[in-house]
Image (spheres, rainbow, N blue to C red):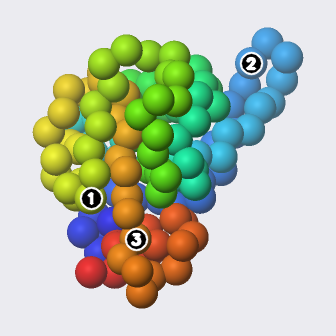
């Protein structure tokens, strides 16, 4: 992503500080992509889980919408995906190894789950695998 969008548009392992009535709070999304028409936030998990939905929808999305004044598109990137796993949102958009372009075509308000399967020769770690994907 850095190659495609550059450092001014993409940040990995970001630290976002925001203020509430109780004082300063922190958010640590795995990636933020700043586009002209929207902000995209990524959370990387080894396996698909409802906790990622909470982090993206209830924590990162409202903070980044207030900061950027643009709609925020959310995406969970997973290495292991189980369709039987209960999920708090109906109708999320699921895509596998199809690339970022397919994800960016989906409706901004819809939750995206990107099932990224590393090649057998690639490490099983999703974060380092994503870096390998970005290097292509």
Position in image of residue 92 (x %, y %):
33, 25
Dot 1 or dot 2, earlier in sequence = 2
Residue at numbered disc 2: 20
Please tell me which residue is depicted at 58% across the width and 54% down the height of the picture: 46
Please tell me which residue is depicted at 54% across the width and 73% down the height of the picture: 124
Q: Nearer the viewer, mark 2 or mark 3?
A: 3
Q: CA distance from mark 2 to mark 3?
A: 39 Å
Q: Secondary structure at mark 1?
A: loop
Position in image of residue 66 (x %, y %):
49, 23
* Quadrant where the N terminus is found in the figure: bottom left
Please tell me which residue is depicted at 58% across the width and 36% down the height of the picture: 49
Q: CA distance from mark 1 to mark 3?
A: 9 Å
Dot 2 or dot 3, earlier in sequence = 2
Residue lying furthest right: 22
Residue at numbered disc 1: 97
Residue at numbered disc 3: 118
Position in image of residue 18 (x %, y %):
68, 31
Within-10-Å neighbours for mark 3: few <14, some 14–19, many 20+: some
Q: Quadrant of residue 108?
A: top left
Residue 16 visible at all: yes
Mark 2–mark 3 contact, CB under 8 Å? no
Position in image of residue 58 (x %, y %):
58, 21
């Amino acid at each position: 992503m850095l190659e495609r969008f550059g450092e001014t548009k993409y940040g990995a392992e970001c630290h976002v500080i925001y203020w509430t009535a109780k004082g300063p709070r922190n958010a640590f999304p795995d990636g933020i992509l700043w586009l002209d028409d929207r902000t995209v936030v990524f959370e990387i998990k080894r396996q698909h889980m409802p906790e990622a939905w909470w982090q993206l929808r209830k924590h990162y999305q409202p903070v980044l919408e207030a900061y950027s004044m643009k709609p925020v598109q959310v995406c969970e990137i997973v290495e292991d995906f189980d369709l039987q796993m209960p999920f708090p949102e109906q109708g999320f958009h699921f895509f596998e190894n199809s690339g970022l372009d397919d994800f960016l075509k989906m409706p901004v308000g819809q939750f995206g789950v990107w099932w990224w399967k590393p090649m057998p020769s690639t490490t099983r770690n999703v974060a380092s695998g994503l870096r390998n994907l970005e290097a292509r």
